[in-house]
């Protein structure tokens, strides 16, 4: 047998595994779909952080600095994509989140967990590579079988990014603090306690990651599963 024939045969034998793996388009599509699903959840967490009775930054500015931020009525409309409170004080949080979420989630899902071949003792178990593979590997069928893991990895990654983004002395936290301190000079009188204002900023932002659990329906993450539509979408990839 010619060397060309041997190489062609090896390529054909490897082809089913190659085309059944969740590779570039698959990884990008699934990652973007999860981020898209979470967009309203993250926005809901921001909305809860910006409700009238939770506006610690705005209340602190009024109490300590004599400045009341002018907030538009859309603050009270949950359907609004952004309230003026969030736009004014929390845009740095959103920008940092959007910068980090895609590479982090893609890495956690596919580089750290769903990767490698499905074969056990040289053969693919029933259901592998698709549609329901009981082996952790880099195929859509594996993601279907272990879908609860997809849910938990996604939530943990997104919550971790939000926790790091809102942590004291993080770049986004400092940006929010600077905006609040800049507003503190608009009250026409000396701001009594800028340190107190800084504490209010940190307290307000520290509540954000916990708001994500509430927006997801509690520890069971019932509102952050999207199981039926995500499984259907995952299986569109070979």
Image (cartoon, rainbow, N blue to C red):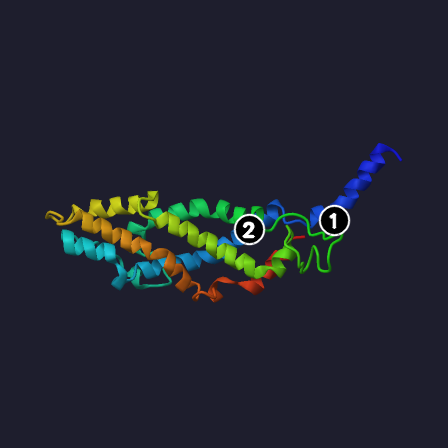
Most distant residue in the left direction: 189
In the picture, the quarter occupied by the N terminus is: top right
Q: Is residue 190 left or right of residue 146?
A: left
Helix, strand or loop at disc 1?
A: helix
Q: Is residue 190 left or right of residue 208?
A: left
- C-alpha span from label 2 to label 1: 22 Å
Q: Residue at x 51, y 55 (%)?
A: 153
Query: In front of the other: label 2 or label 1?
Result: 2
- Residue placed most toward the observer, 68 or 48: 48
Most distant residue in the top direction: 3
Can the viewer see residue 68?
Answer: no
Q: Which mark is residue 16?
A: 1
**Which tag, 2 or 1, sits closer to the chain's start?**
1
- Residue placed most toward the observer, 37 or 159: 159
**Rendered view: 195 above or below 132:** above
Q: Which mark is residue 109?
A: 2
x and y, in percent, of residue 106 in the image: 53, 48
Sort mark 1 into few (<14), some (14-19) or many (20+) by Cα contacts within 10 Å: few
Sort mark 2 into few (<14), some (14-19) or many (20+) by Cα contacts within 10 Å: many
- Residue placed most toward the observer, 33 or 135: 135
Helix, strand or loop at disc 2?
A: helix
Q: Residue at x 76, y 53 (%)?
A: 123
x and y, in percent, of residue 206 in the image: 32, 54
Q: Residue at x 56, y 52 (%)?
A: 30
x and y, in percent, of residue 6 in the image: 83, 37
- Residue placed most toward the observer, 66 or 166: 166
x and y, in percent, of residue 203 in the image: 28, 55
């Amino acid at each position: 047998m010619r060397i060309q024939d041997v190489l062609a045969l090896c390529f054909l034998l490897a082809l089913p595994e190659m085309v059944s793996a969740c590779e570039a388009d698959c990884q990008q599509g699934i990652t973007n779909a999860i981020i898209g699903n979470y967009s309203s959840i993250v926005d809901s967490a921001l909305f809860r952080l910006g409700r009238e009775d939770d506006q610690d930054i705005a209340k602190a500015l009024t109490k300590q600095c004599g400045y009341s931020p002018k907030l538009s009525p859309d603050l009270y409309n949950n359907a609004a994509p952004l309230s003026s409170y969030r736009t004014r004080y929390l845009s740095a949080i959103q920008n940092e989140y959007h910068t980090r979420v895609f590479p982090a989630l893609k890495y956690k899902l596919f580089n750290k967990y769903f990767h490698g071949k499905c074969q056990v003792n040289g053969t693919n178990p029933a259901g592998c590579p698709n549609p329901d593979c009981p082996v952790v590997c880099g195929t859509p069928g594996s993601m279907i079988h272990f879908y609860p893991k997809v849910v938990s990895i996604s939530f943990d990654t997104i919550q971790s990014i939000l926790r790091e983004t809102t942590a004291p002395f993080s770049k986004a936290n400092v940006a929010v603090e600077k905006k609040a301190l800049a507003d503190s000079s608009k009250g026409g009188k000396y701001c009594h306690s800028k340190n107190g204002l800084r504490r209010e900023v940190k307290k307000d932002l520290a509540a954000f990651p916990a708001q994500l659990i509430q927006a997801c329906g509690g520890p069971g993450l019932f509102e952050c599963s999207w199981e039926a539509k995500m499984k259907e979408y995952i299986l569109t990839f070979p």
